[in-house]
Amino acid sequence: MNRTENTVTNPPLPNNYASEFLIIKDGKGVWLRDISGKKYLDFTGGIAVNALGYGRADLAEIAYKQMKSVTHTSNLFTTEPVLQLAVKMVRSWNFSAVHFSNSGSEANETAIKYARLYSSRVKGKDSHKLLCFSNGFHGRTLGALSCTPKAKYQEPFMPLLPGVTIAEYNNTEQLLELADSTYAGIIVEVVQGEGGLDSMTEDFARALNETCKKYDILLIADEIQTGLSRTGTFYASEGVGLQPDIITLAKPLAGGLPLSATLIPDKVNDLIHVGEHGTTFGGGPVTTAVASKIWDILSDKDFIEEVKQKGDYLNKLLSDLKSRHGFLGSVKGKGLLAGIRYRGRAKGKDDKAVQDDIQRIMSTAREEEGLLILRSGTDVLRFAPPLIISREELALGVEKLESVFKKIF
Ligand code: PMP
């Protein structure tokens, strides 16, 4: 392990992460500071987690108070914070219950299990299949991974779940051809956060709604990255008219504490028996107490409208940026889950050259401009800043990005 004044190389963390890490010390608002004191404008938001930004004394106070009282009870008992949050969550749409867990993967794992349970009890044991989509991302546990069709993620861990079909995202015709009553669930993102920021079309949303109704397939909207106002509507599903039976949530739910949720309707909850699913840590009093406060802030109509307007502003800034640089492609995403495609600097550039350029853009942004950004898919620069970001900070981030282009190209 080697250290510089603000980075560490080869720490005792598994090789599935980078070999070099920036060491973060603290943060305030949308700014992070490393251990050398250097500041960074954070367009990563902890990968769409830190919706309310850093250094939130109000959230820390809630966690502190709850930890002094009772930190964990197990799901043999419940507590007021759990009940308060669960009631708010089921009222947010037409849900009957919420299963809390610890990560996005687990929320999807739960959704997959519930879909199978429902389908086997209503349609029979043979109706266990799952449909997912190209460039989708649903997590790293084996069930969720089975619905995440990327060779790099899947191949070392084969065999995965049987009965998973991959269809092309936004291809209505193919969906109608493939679907039948042997499917238990269809899992889908409204904006593909990890896979390149493609957005669901309204036509595809309608086809998903109708297909799922026709064959009694449970429609699972993975809103782990898009949910809780990030795309300018509380649920991204609302924005395109998707009518999911199940919604999964995680990233911003508890402000960086590990909490995820699987929201289910009556028809599923009615069929589940005691002991058929469970978790030790999922939905403890500390995470839910913090999440309750976050829920109130993120579900406020004015807050959502503000995110929408800031998303439109970021979209305009990125469109203007694109018009000034021929190597940039389409502006992608929705609201404050936005991105821009990097096409490469010359025709005929191979993938490797594009990858190297993107790596250089990201590291120059960090080292020379103090701007932290993400990638989505292979060639999209992704921005998922805290939702409390100001217009000035959005403009500053895009200015910094343009300075990076000027420096290296
Ligand atoms: N679904 C989506 C849409 C995600 O973006 C992610 C995480 N990037 C997951 C599922 C998995 O979440 P986790 O890493 O918390 O398991």
Image (cartoon, rainbow, N blue to C red):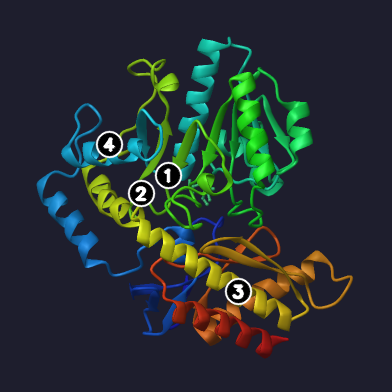
Mark toward the viewer: 3 or 4: 3
Q: Give the Cα separation between the discs numbered 3 and 4.
A: 38 Å
Is disc 2's CB within 8 Å of ligand 1? Answer: yes
Q: Are marks 2 and 1 in contact (CB under 8 Å)?
A: yes
How far from the left and from the top, in percent, is residue 161? 62, 28
Closer to the N terminus: mark 3 or mark 4? Answer: 4
| Residue kind at label 2, given as amino acid type | Pro
Mark toward the viewer: 2 or 3: 3
How far from the left and from the top, in percent, is residue 180? 70, 20
Q: Residues within 10 Å of mark 3 (few under 14, many from 20)?
A: few
| Extreme residue toward the right, this view | 348
Q: Residue at x 15, y 50 (%)?
A: 66
Q: Residue at x 26, y 66 (%)?
A: 56
Q: Looking at the image, which is closer to me, 321 or 14?
A: 321
Closer to the N terminus: mark 2 or mark 1? Answer: 1
Residue 6 seen in this snapshot: no
Q: Residue at x 60, y 54 (%)?
A: 194
Q: Give the Cα separation between the discs numbered 2 and 3.
A: 34 Å
Q: Give the Cα separation between the discs numbered 4 and 1.
A: 20 Å
Q: Secondary structure at mark 2?
A: loop
Q: Secondary structure at mark 3?
A: helix
Q: Looking at the image, which is closer to me, 156 or 267?
A: 267
For mark 2, what is the residue?
258
Q: Are marks 3 and 4 in contact (CB under 8 Å)?
A: no
Closer to the N terminus: mark 2 or mark 4? Answer: 4
- The circle on residue 87 is 4
- The circle on residue 103 is 1
